[in-house]
Image (cartoon, rainbow, N blue to C red):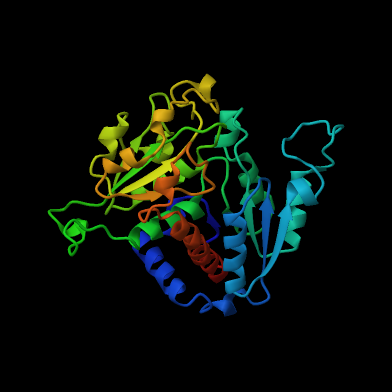
């Protein structure tokens, strides 16, 4: 595997999930693959889970790790061509990238959307420059439009929590009914990217043993590139009915129906906050969120602290999803 950005890069999901379980049972089994190999993790934005889980996964595989926080430990970088560099940016990404490639074997990149220029963000300009100029295999640690390591961990978490209707038989074996997974928009005080919901939808749709429903206010439609074929229900209560998993996430306006709205907060309806009443509409549903989460805005305290909250196992599985990806990339070197 030369790069990891979207779900198709991982290949057959059943095989990837089986590999995840194998690694979870023995996290150091493939240490030999990373011996004398170096991972460079490049952060254009803040991180907690991604940084810790990726570094831990690399160490499990025997790798050396270099972490570069572009905003705190490097020259300010220019990312666009044709700019007269007479401001505060001292180095261009097009020189910095091949230099970084000299010092490592794999590169992980984290770079959020600017949320002002949709075309620039959705072209994945920064990530693609690394792919083109680094000379190294590159994987996404969240980009302007996707967060595949999170979505893979989410899928692992869902598979580890099989839902039953009678305490014995998995739903997928009962009259063909599959677990119902709902991706719900929730309010937020800041404009956030669409990367997590894009990838979550993409990965859930790729798993044919899951029924995905997406619910959000009108005007917040996600890009068809990621959600084509998904069922969209604008009535949140109707979407939650009978759900087995609720995945709450805010995203700013994707600008699909109106490009001028891209990156803006065009709805702040607090009735979308996931509380106990919302969860009562479900089939004893499990609550999921990628973290960090704004409590009592995205979700209430009692829901995220309940026995049905999976947010901590999700976070733990970030180490596992990344281990699978790094293992496969090392095997391809």
Q: Where 320 sits versus 301, above or below? A: below
Q: Residue furthest right?
A: 86
| Residue 115 in which image quadrant | top right
Front-lying residue, 262 or 135: 262
Front-lying residue, 219 or 36: 219
Tell me which residue sits at (41%, 46%) in the image: 302
| Side of 276 relative to 55 (left or right) | left
Q: Give residue 233's position: percent from left, percent from top.
A: 30, 32
Count of labels in the image:
0
| Residue 53 in which image quadrant | bottom right
| Side of 325 relative to 126 (left or right) | left
Q: Where 38 sits versus 78, above or below? A: below
Front-lying residue, 150 or 137: 150
Whether residue 333 can be seen here: no
Tell me which residue sits at (68%, 75%) in the image: 36
Q: Residue furthest left?
A: 175
Q: Give residue 37's position: percent from left, percent from top.
A: 66, 71
Whether residue 273 can be seen here: yes
Quadrant containing the C terminus is bottom right
Q: Give residue 273's position: percent from left, percent from top.
A: 41, 35
| Side of 185 relative to 115 (left or right) | left
Q: Give residue 216's position: percent from left, percent from top.
A: 38, 31
Q: Where 178 sits versus 83, above or below? A: below
| Side of 102 relative to 299 (left or right) | right
């Amino acid at each position: 595997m030369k790069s990891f950005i979207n779900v198709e890069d991982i290949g057959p999901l059943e095989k990837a999930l089986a590999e995840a379980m194998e690694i979870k049972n023995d996290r150091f089994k493939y240490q030999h693959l990373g011996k004398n190999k170096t991972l460079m993790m490049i952060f254009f934005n803040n991180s907690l889970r991604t940084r810790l889980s990726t570094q831990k996964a690399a160490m499990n595989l025997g790798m050396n790790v270099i972490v570069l926080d572009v905003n705190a430990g490097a020259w300010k970088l220019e990312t666009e061509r044709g700019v007269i560099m007479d401001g505060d940016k001292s180095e261009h990404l097009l020189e910095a990238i091949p230099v970084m490639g000299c010092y490592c074997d794999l590169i992980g990149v984290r770079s959020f959307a600017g949320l002002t220029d949709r075309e620039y963000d959705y072209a994945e300009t920064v990530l693609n420059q690394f792919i083109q100029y680094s000379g190294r295999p590159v994987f996404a640690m969240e980009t302007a439009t996707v967060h595949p390591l999170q979505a893979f961990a989410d899928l692992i978490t869902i598979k580890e929590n099989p839902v039953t209707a009678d305490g014995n038989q998995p739903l997928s074996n009962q009259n063909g009914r599959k677990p119902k997974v709902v991706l719900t928009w929730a309010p937020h005080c800041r404009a956030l990217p669409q990367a997590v919901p894009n990838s979550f939808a993409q990965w859930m749709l790729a798993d044919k043993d899951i029924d995905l429903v997406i619910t959000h206010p009108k005007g917040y439609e996600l890009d068809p590139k990621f959600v084509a074929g998904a069922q969209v229900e604008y009535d949140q209560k109707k979407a939650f009915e009978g759900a087995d998993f609720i995945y709450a996430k805010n995203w700013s306006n994707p600008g699909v129906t109106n490009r001028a709205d891209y990156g803006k907060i065009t709805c702040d309806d607090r009735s979308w906050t996931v509380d106990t009443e919302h969860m009562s509409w479900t089939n004893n549903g499990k609550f999921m969120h990628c973290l960090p989460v704004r409590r009592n805005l995205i979700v209430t305290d009692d829901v995220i602290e309940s026995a049905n909250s999976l947010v901590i196992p999700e976070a733990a599985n970030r180490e596992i999803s990344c281990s699978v990806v790094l293992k496969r990339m090392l095997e391809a070197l």
